[in-house]
Image (cartoon, rainbow, N blue to C red):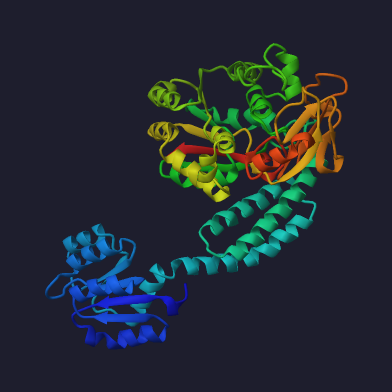
Amino acid sequence: MNNDKIKILWADDEIDLLKPHILFLEQKGYEIIAVNNGNTAIAKCLSEKPDLVFLDENMPGISGLETLKQIKEIDADVKVIMITKSEEEYIMDDAIGSQIADYLIKPVNPNQILHSIKKIIDKNRLITEKTTQNYQQDFRNLSNMLTDNISLDEWKDVYNKLIFWELEFDKSSDKSMGEIYLSQKKEANHNFCKFITKNYISYLSPTGDNGPVMSNNLMRRKVVPQMQDGIPTFFVLIDNLRLDQWRTISPILKEKFKIIEDDQYLAILPTTTQYCRNAIFSGLLPSEIEKRFPEKWSNDEDEGGKNNFELDFFNDLLSRLRINGKTSYTKVTNLDGGKAMVDDVPNMFKNDINVIVYNFVDAFSHARTDVSIIRELAEDEAAYRSVTESWFKHSPLWDALQLISEKKCRVVITTDHGSVRVDKPVKVVGDKNTNSNLRYKQGKNLTYDAKEVFEIKKPETAYLPKVNVSQSFAVCKEDDFFAYPNNYNYYVKYYTNTFQHGGISLEEMLIPFIVMENR
């Protein structure tokens, strides 16, 4: 908003004495409407529609507080700055209770007034200008990093910076810089996919503790070390939680917890619950799970749930690690389950580790695809974050965490994978047994353009189960999704701009790992 468009109504019974102040503001480009009583101020609010009102608290006739009340009835959103000679508490309480934007104590000087205007009216513009200026300075640094052959830890730094700027642009009205940011983020995802394609298989080789933290070694390397000193540990896995969503809810958690580690780890491929979460709880890669638990591993084409044995896998992992202790496992898939979990929190403190799997974000992302009104609620990333924040504030999970924070404990918050908003269809042909996931396909007769996917011709090299001799996997990259040629237009129309997971992207693979302690 430009100054010459900002209209300020100033009501004061000594308005003639304020002419120097008014002249000062007019020279700064503001339009000032000067009145000397409350009734005229109310009439001018009706006729002039001011952006801001300066209101003297102590005027003869109708008081400043009564004027304020009537102005708010005319326009509840208009910003009002109360000016008063008195600092009496009841006056301030009445004014603040009536939703004033600011107050000043007489005598006021022009710079005080200007500062108050800028703080209120120009706030969004100033934030935008500062955000734009700072991002322009960081843009070159990020671009230089994206051209180098950077390490996985450096990719974490890049992604953290990108998420920081994405959240900053949520507060900004500069759409042009937002578009530049999205272009840079797309470039980052392109280069990250090249990085993963080049390095992923080597990351799966047995490397002790020298390789990256991934789904299959997360428990051993990051969670089990938290189980010490007899302090109860709570392992909270929020299904399908992206890093930007974590950044959105973290300020809420900081009210009750001290964050002592804020990191990311690498999800395995395919980035789905079936593969990633089973790997987390078993401490094994998918083909290793199938070999150790042939009756409990489900392949894509098998009927029924794919994550029915997480507790069995977890108990087996603790046994292999020779960890003795009391455990609990709670999976929450609906509101009643969440309320039951809250009721059980006091009992959890008797255990060494308590696992809570909370399935809201993933369920919401699927519902967003299938239900048009939910798609409107979360049209883009910013809206998706907003819905996540609103859900968390009012969820049984937050109720439970507040109870947990009342006693000495450690809390780990993480996820199994993220999701990406898909935009570009790529064609694939498969037989009737090909799985339905839009971000990866596995089968024995897959046809696709090898340049468009991460091709895993030998599943055993990626520690993926091999159902038949000619089976292969094809994994989407960036914001691509698979579409069948014989129903191509349907797939493109229905799935474009939906959140999907299973493939390679920063959003799906670099996911949050948080350790907190109660304050």
Q: Which residue is at the front of the view, 424 or 502?
A: 424
Q: Position of residue 95 (x, y in %)?
A: 23, 62
Residue 510 sits above or below residue 175 on the image: above
Question: Image check: 287 left or right of 263?
Answer: right
Q: Is residue 319 left or right of residue 457?
A: left
317 or 230, which lies in front? 317
Choose top left, top right, bottom left or bottom right for residue 491. Answer: top right
**Tag count in the figure?**
0
Q: Is residue 331 above or below residue 12?
A: above
Q: Is residue 5 visible?
A: yes
Residue at 54% across, 40% down:
372
Choose top left, top right, bottom left or bottom right for residue 164. bottom right
In the current view of this chain or complex, which residue is farthest to the top? Answer: 295
Above or below for 203 versus 128: above
x 34%, y 87%: residue: 23
Can the viewer see residue 510?
A: no
Residue that protrudes farthest toward the left in the picture: 61
Residue 492, position in %: x, y? 70, 42
Question: Residue 29's quadrant in the figure?
Answer: bottom left
Q: Residue at x 21, y 76 (%)?
A: 40
- Is 405 in front, or is 390? 390
Location of the C terminus by quadrant is top left
Image coordinates of residue 294 in percent, x first then y, are 72, 13
Measured as percent of width and height from the top left, residue 102 is found at 31, 66
Image: 126 above or below 346: below
